Image (cartoon, rainbow, N blue to C red):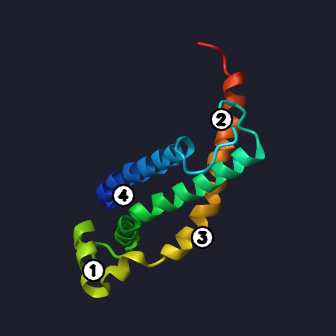
Amino acid sequence: GLPGFFRAFVSGFVRFPLALGIFFVSYEAMKRGPVWPRQDSGSKDTSGAAVQLRNSVYGAMAGVLCWTSVFPLDVVQSRVMGEAVYGAGRQYTGVVACARQLYNTEGVAGFTRGYSAVLMRAGPVNAVLFPAVDVLKPLIEEKLPEG
């Protein structure tokens, strides 16, 4: 019924702000910090190949940091939400019960199942995402009306 739509809602509510906070803060911190030698100091041009390469590396690193920080929560949330049985036959009564049972049966390794596949996707996807936003943002902003 209707409550089924909200299974694991609380874990998602915790996971998304945490993940996105780490994602954006780490990317911006790397862009502004002395992680990579800057060739573009003082320049507003974000189209240079060196700048885009640097931002791609930062994007990939931010994606990996993001997923690493929340992956155990994602595993638990996915198990609770993906459970196809309803009613008394459910294996997990909730997120905390799932985490407890997962730890008791599989140990810490249970919280990392599928992590390598996520990392293989997170790096390349985010290596493209942030630099694309950085290049497109000024183009879009100049098309928007003032005010």
Residue found farthest to the top: 147
Q: Which residue in the protein does label 4 denote? A: 5
Q: Position of residue 72 (x, y in %)?
A: 37, 69
Q: Which residue in the protein does label 1 denote? A: 103
Q: Residues within 10 Å of mark 1 (few under 14, many from 20)?
A: some
Residue 71 located left or right of residue 2: right
Q: Which residue in the protein does label 3 denote? A: 120
Say what secondary structure mark 1 lies in.
helix
> In this rendering, which labeled residue sits more in front, label 1 or label 3?
3
Q: Which residue in the protein does label 2 denote? A: 41
Give the CA distance from mark 1 to mark 3: 25 Å
Give the CA distance from mark 3 to mark 4: 30 Å
Residue located at (22% from left, 72% from top): 97
Say what secondary structure mark 4 lies in.
helix
Q: Is residue 61 above or below residue 46?
A: below
> In this rendering, which labeled residue sits more in front, label 3 or label 4?
3
- The reply to whether dot 1 and dot 3 touch (C-beta < 8 Å) is no
